[in-house]
Image: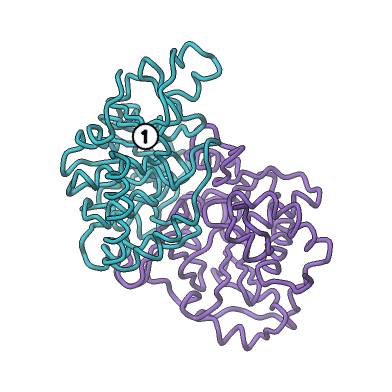
Chain colours: A cyan, B purple
Amino acid sequence: MNPISLEALAAEVPDGAMLALPPDNSLPSVALAKALIRRGVRNLRLVGVPVSGFATDILIGAGCVTSVQTSAVSLGEAGFAPRFSAALRAGKIKVIDATCPAIHTMLQAAEKGVPFMPLRGLIGSDILANRPDWKVVPNPFATNGEDPIVLLPALNPDFVCFHALMADEEGNVWVGRRRECATIAHASKRALVTVERVVPGNFLEDERLASGAINATYISGIAIAERGARPVALLDEYGFDGAYVSEYARMARSEEGFAAWCAREVFEQKAQAAE
Amino acid sequence: MTEIKLEERITVALAKLILDPSAPPARHIAVGAASPMPAAACWLVKKQGNPVRLSLLHKRSGNPFTEGTRELFDLTGQGRIDLFFLGGGQIDGSANLNLVGTGEWPGMGVRFPGSFGSAFMYFMTPRTILFREEHTPRVFVEKVDNISAPGVSPPGVFRRGTAQALVTGRCVFRFHPDRARFSLESVHPGETVESVRDATGFAFDVAGDVPFTPDPTPEELALLRGPICDEMMETYPEFCTRVFGRKQAA
């Protein structure tokens, strides 16, 4: 699989797509989120696996998003996600709340190709009360009493985007221990992946690399984006840029501030890189 | 640096609750997102020589999970995690947690980040220690606006445990699941039963004289400000700088 350009990768995602994103501790592709903003994508239905962070907030701020299914949206130590909060208050996005293991479980059902999976907990939570698509049934195997349990439908996103450390010549990508990226790739129709670099060989031939790899069969497109997770950390490659996120959190408190940030960090940066 | 920071007092109070001999044993403790004080309390318990396994969800290097974050929930589903920590934007007198927001669902007043794993973890761990530094009537309310995770469950609903206690910036409450109420266990120096009552939106029980929460010992403070700060710097640099006075690397 030959890498394509970042902008070409972003062009693969049509308006209205359901797009799953990992959170800030698990390989989000901030580079691709910025490219999606430049492409002017609209009406994305985001899924936070299992929560949402920086990439989600900038996509919402740029008006690319119509709904978010997630278990939380936060900028970590930099606090609440400002454009998410503002968009919810203004009625510009629909928020579908979940709880972390429910998101994982719905994706695992899709991964297995079964229509639903059960999950413990949740009974008595208003999350459940606001999820007409989740059902409570008696445990059919219970030996003592009814034992109510929640059933969650399979979740099959149109796309997942994440940032892997590297790809090989065969199009396998390597994410190390961040295996939720594998679960989302298995469960989604198409996986678009940015990488720091492409290396010779085949990860699946190397016993030490194979367990951290995602087979190319699940990958629909790869683009090289050096520092593509920035400002988020990438495994042991580079750390979290707290100052960058704090500045964003300050500027994005207002719509004008976000627009100025976006002009500088999403559009100008790209123009400079192209020169 | 001898002044005891409130965060240090809360951390040491959390550590004492982890080691509470009347609670089920804590052999394997997990710490989730945005939890620097619980993480520090766990490190304190461990560095004091207690045999405990710590799984810190947000640790970047040496992260304990090799199957992604879902492994935390799978472990907890099986009953392999003994203790977890939860906070809340609102917590009420029955230990219901609201991490979603105030007003109409899904938080049309003030939106909080969201429920994270609370709606599962609160049911599936044998005990949960609640923590929230801000102790005001807007946080500790009579009834939460929205329930992320309920404090108690009716008979017949599968549940391994409930809150053990709630540690705040003013006091330590003990939770009694049989009557779904808190009682006041200790007040931090400078507080009284009355000052805690004034700052709390829910009714709670008081039995006899309420002692002060003990000060952290010099040994505990030295551990927190030295080796524990070292462990936490990568995950919580802002907290380590603010509380322990540690300079961040350029």
Residue located at (45% from left, 60% from top): A246
Q: Nearer the viewer, residue A82 or B211?
A: A82
Q: Give the letter of the chain under mark 1.
A: A
Front-lying residue, A256 or B98: A256
Residue A146 at x, y percent in the picture: 41, 46
Q: Measuring 45% from the left and 62% from the top, which residue is drawn there?
A: A79
Q: Is residue A38 above or below residue A167?
A: below
Residue A197 in picture, x, y percent from top left: 42, 27
Which one is in front, A143 or A224? A224
The residue shown at (53%, 44%) is: A239
What percent of the width, then of the height, locates residue A179? Answer: 46, 32
- Residue A9: in sight, yes or no? yes
Q: Quadrant of residue B180?
A: bottom right
Circle 1: residue type: Ala
Query: Is A273 placed left or right of A74 in the picture?
Result: left
> Does B83 sit above or below residue B135?
above
Element assignment for label 1: loop
Q: Which residue is at the far front?
A: A275
| Pick the front one: B250 or A246 | B250
Give how far across and how far down residue A217 sits, in percent: 32, 19
- Report crowding for label 1: few under 14, some 14 to 19, many 20 or more residues within 10 A (C-alpha): many
Residue A107 against residue B85 in the figure, above or below:
above
Residue pointed to by mark 1 = A225
Q: Quadrant location of the N terminus of chain B?
A: bottom right
